Amino acid sequence: MDQEPVVGDVVAGEVTEIHPNGAVVRLAGGQVGFLHVSEMDLTPDGEGPAWVRIGDRVVAKVVGYDRLGRPSLSVRRATDLDREALEFHQQALEFGTALRRQAGLALNGPQGTEEEDPIEWRLRKWLTTTQSALAKLRRRRATRPSPRPELDEQGDPCPKERP
């Protein structure tokens, strides 16, 4: 992702710095985001945040921007479905790159007709459709509220208020 991520996007990055209150994560395109300690995964025993180390690869959801203009990241709010969608998108990009390299095709350049390149034409169409569907999924998920319950100061779920 070479453009600025928006709230709701799922991004992957590498931890480059550790601070007492969180970690700095380098995203694609050289951008950096901040992963606050409260948004890290919990340890298996549920006692506290599972600290990351420098060099760890994390998949997180963009939940806002901090005062420095960096994306605020959350590993806790990224669901398994988000991780699968990001992995699928990365595989589709790798597949497209391999296809262009092997066939010598440019997706936006002059192309032959469907009769001349039926397989390449169908693969380009599939890749375009897949990228469009993934973008639609991201937009739809960005407008949905997070399925995670709100937590109080002790980390316990807050009771839902009834109207």
Image (spheres, grey):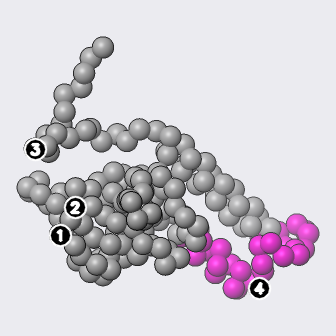
Q: Residue at x 55, y 69 (%)?
A: 1
Q: Which residue is mark 4?
A: 104
Q: Which residue is mark 2?
A: 37
Which residues make up the magenta segment? 91-120
Q: Which residue is mark 1?
A: 20
Q: Quadrant of the C terminus?
A: top left
Q: Which residue is mark 3?
A: 154
Q: Residue furthest front?
A: 67
- Pinpoint residue 17: horizontal percent, then vertical percent: 28, 78
Q: Residue at x 60, y 53 (%)?
A: 135
- Pinpoint residue 117: horizontal percent, then vertical percent: 84, 73
Magenta-drawn stretch contains 99: yes
**How dense is the environment of label 1, judged by Cα within 10 Å: few (below 14), some, or many (20 and up)?**
few
What's the distance in space between the residues labelled 3 and 4, CA to CA?
Answer: 58 Å
Q: Amino acid at mark 2?
A: Val
- Pinpoint residue 12: horizontal percent, then vertical percent: 42, 68
Q: Amino acid at mark 3?
A: Gln
The numbered mark, 4 or 2, whose residue comes first in the sequence reads 2
| Left or right of residue 96: residue 144 | left
- Pinpoint residue 101: horizontal percent, then vertical percent: 69, 85
Cβ atoms at labels 4 and 2 below 8 Å apart: no
Location of residue 145 (image quadrant): top left
